[in-house]
Amino acid sequence: MRVGRFAPSPTGAMHLGNARTALLAWLHTRAAGGRHILRFEDLDVGRVRDWAYDCTRRDLEWLGLDWDAEYLQSQRLEHYAGALGRLDTYPCTCTRKEVLAAIQQSAGAPHGEEAVYAGTCRQQTAHPERPAALRWRVPDAEVCAHDQLRPEPLCQHLPRDVGDFVLRRSDGVYAYHLAVVVDDALMNVTDVVRGADLLSATPRQMALQGALGYPAPRYWHLPLMTNYGGERLAKRGGAPPLRDLRERGKGPERVLGDLAHSLGWPEWADLPPEVTAAELLERVPEWFGRLMVES
Ligand code: GLU
């Protein structure tokens, strides 16, 4: 049985970019006759807005997208604790500033876009009096993520390109990478359809899957929606929330039509400007469907 999911962070109102990801994840699961999960990624309590849960549910329903089960990560902490206990971690009390200073001093780093942790606390924790984050001692290996929408795999060497990353912050919050890996496994997720911003996180998530003995799902990283200036839509960047369009009387069919056309898929070029989610499901392009056939 195919299992897909949409995993929003309830930190604000969904914008069109979130809606496009939600739509494609839903189409992907439903076209394969699979089970679809809504999972609220709400571990970072400081950023969660209580109203965002209902707002997200209402936005999805308004678009005509449904789901078979709903989970809140904030109610699943024992699963993350259990997984964390099975991994080789060490406490780290360095502040962000100290971590960056160590990176600048170390020979090989930083490179690429991301600063790679220099492993300062690997042997010994510098400030035992401070609350400690837990870092994963990453295996000395290269991990390649094969994305279904890209011809080339994305390979990262864990110590060189990723570094020992935090699995539990010093304030006790479990890291997204740990939670997502545990949840996808325990929820039997087979297909992950999400934004391209998470592609570079996939090798490290696959490394965690390997260490925990979980199977790797298949990945589809979707291009992110941009505004006219070419900038990625973001909740913080003032992208218009779906809720506003809804309240201004724009119909869901019109929003879905705009989202479908925004993809530029030739198979959808002749879609009318207004469509329902069910109509889109009937017209899922063959190549998108073919990828979903059991391999
Ligand atoms: N919660 C993440 C987000 O809203 C998505 C995580 C995922 O799909 O793996 O960007």
Image: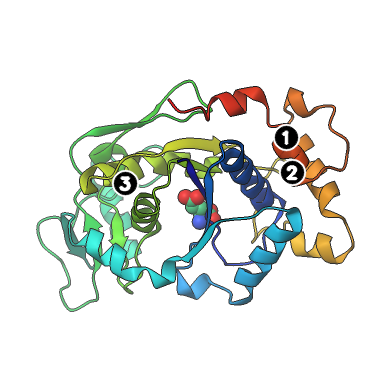
Mark drawn on residue 116: 3
Element type at mark 1: helix
Mark 2–mark 1 CB contact (< 8 Å)? yes
Mark drawn on residue 282: 1
Q: Quadrant of residue 110?
A: top left
Residue at horizontal 60 percent and vertical 28 percent from the top? 289
246 vs 57, left or right, is right
Q: Viewer-proximal residue, 263 or 281?
A: 281
Residue 80, horizontal then vertical, whole percent = 30, 63
Residue 190's place in the image compared with 174, above or below, is above
Q: Residues within 10 Å of mark 3 (few under 14, many from 20)?
A: many
Q: Quadrant of residue 27?
A: top right
Query: Which amino acid type is marked by label 2?
Result: Ala
Label 1 CB-ligand 1 distance < 8 A:
no
149 vs 240, left or right, is left
Query: Which amino acid type is marked by label 1?
Result: Glu
Q: Which residue is mark 2?
A: 278
Residue 170's place in the image compared with 16, above or below, is below
Query: Which amino acid type is marked by label 3?
Result: Val
